[in-house]
Amino acid sequence: MATPVQQNLIAKNKSYAANFRQGNLALPPAKKYAVVTCMDARIDPAAAFGISLGDAHVIRNAGGSCRAALRDLVLSQQLLGTTEILVIKHTGCGMLTFKNEDAMAVVRKNLGNEAVWEVGAFLNGDFLPFGDLEKAVMEDIEWVRSSKLIPKSIGVSGWIYEVETGRVRRVA
Amino acid sequence: MATPVQQNLIAKNKSYAANFRQGNLALPPAKKYAVVTCMDARIDPAAAFGISLGDAHVIRNAGGSCRAALRDLVLSQQLLGTTEILVIKHTGCGMLTFKNEDAMAVVRKNLGNEAVWEVGAFLNGDFLPFGDLEKAVMEDIEWVRSSKLIPKSIGVSGWIYEVETGRVRRVA
């Protein structure tokens, strides 16, 4: 039995595939860039950031963290030839709403001590929340600049997307 | 001076924002699910998987790895109430085309020994490539099922998206 969410995927994909005409795109991104943005449900990167199919890697995680995206960025650049990164965080981000100790308390209450141990073992005890949006963009860019795994030749810019207006603005 | 990639973002976003009417969506995903898929440039999850704005977390990394998405999944479920995961890998994935030692050799050649050290320190020396697509989906689901950080009540299904046809099919 498919769940409603699965039924939605099957039905909507059927229409998409019926009209699909871009089956011959190459694996490496045609415009040689990568976008790092948040997993937030209110962001549609292709539409909001004007990314055509085949043009860019789109990396999405909680907060649009470059640190959490290190593996993705290295593979994007070293194996698939991208040369530019756009870091796009957003207003109203969930990462602004909690501290590590809050998240840890929820995990302990809901999932128990073994789960808390896994947060330490697999996530270094850090969910990467942040308290200031623009500062978080700056810190991400500094972190990228300090990593030996990201060549200095890679261009990095920082942006904030407003979920209230659909507008993006540059901050770094 | 904005790069062509930045100019494209600014221009396309201007049109998007001009027609934007969904500024009042809530932070938690309305349909309470999360999609884990690949950063591959040939995938447009909103269009191909029928995800309306505000409905689902969309997590994207190299290979659509649940292991790499652990932080995202825990926050999605524990702080924002999602209860279902769709894992969607795809044909022609870059992760099928190399082994860890190949990627490491490229990193050493292009970026030097300090960068290789960072792969060990920050990525446990593992880029998470895979040799068989369906098996990789199964292994991800088993991994989710074995994590103490993902409750047994969370529904997990596995899918493969065909970049050649635009079609998605269920494998687990």
Image (cartoon, coloured by chain):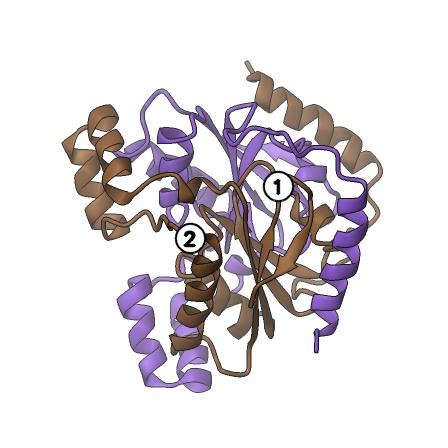
Chain colours: A purple, B brown
At horizontal 43% and vertical 58% (from top left) the residue drawn is B136
- Give the mark nearer the N terminus: 2 vs 1: 2
Q: Residues within 10 Å of mark 2 (few under 14, many from 20)?
A: few
How far from the left and from the top, in percent, is residue A28? Answer: 50, 29
Mark 2 = which residue?
B132
For numbered disc 2, what is the local secondary structure?
loop
Mark 1 = which residue?
B163
Mark in the foreground, 2 or 1: 2
Relative to the observer, which residue lies in front, B60 or A61?
Answer: B60
How far from the left and from the top, in percent, is residue A70? Answer: 36, 43
Q: Amino acid at mark 1?
A: Val
At horizontal 37% and vertical 46% (from top left) the residue drawn is A67
Against A110, residue B150 (above or below) is above
**Quarter of the image holding residue B7?**
top right
For numbered disc 1, what is the local secondary structure?
loop
Left or right of A18, for residue A49: left
Q: Quadrant of the C terminus of chain B?
A: bottom right
Q: Residues within 10 Å of mark 1 (few under 14, many from 20)?
A: many
At horizontal 64% and vertical 58% (from top left) the residue drawn is B169
Against A93, residue A31 (above or below) is above
Relative to the observer, which residue lies in front, A166 or A148?
Answer: A148
Q: Amino acid at mark 2?
A: Asp
Q: Quadrant of the N terminus of chain B?
A: top right
Pinpoint the chain carrying mark 2. Answer: B
Pinpoint the chain carrying mark 1. Answer: B
**Could you give the CA–CA distance between mark 2 and mark 1, rounded to whole angstroms?**
16 Å
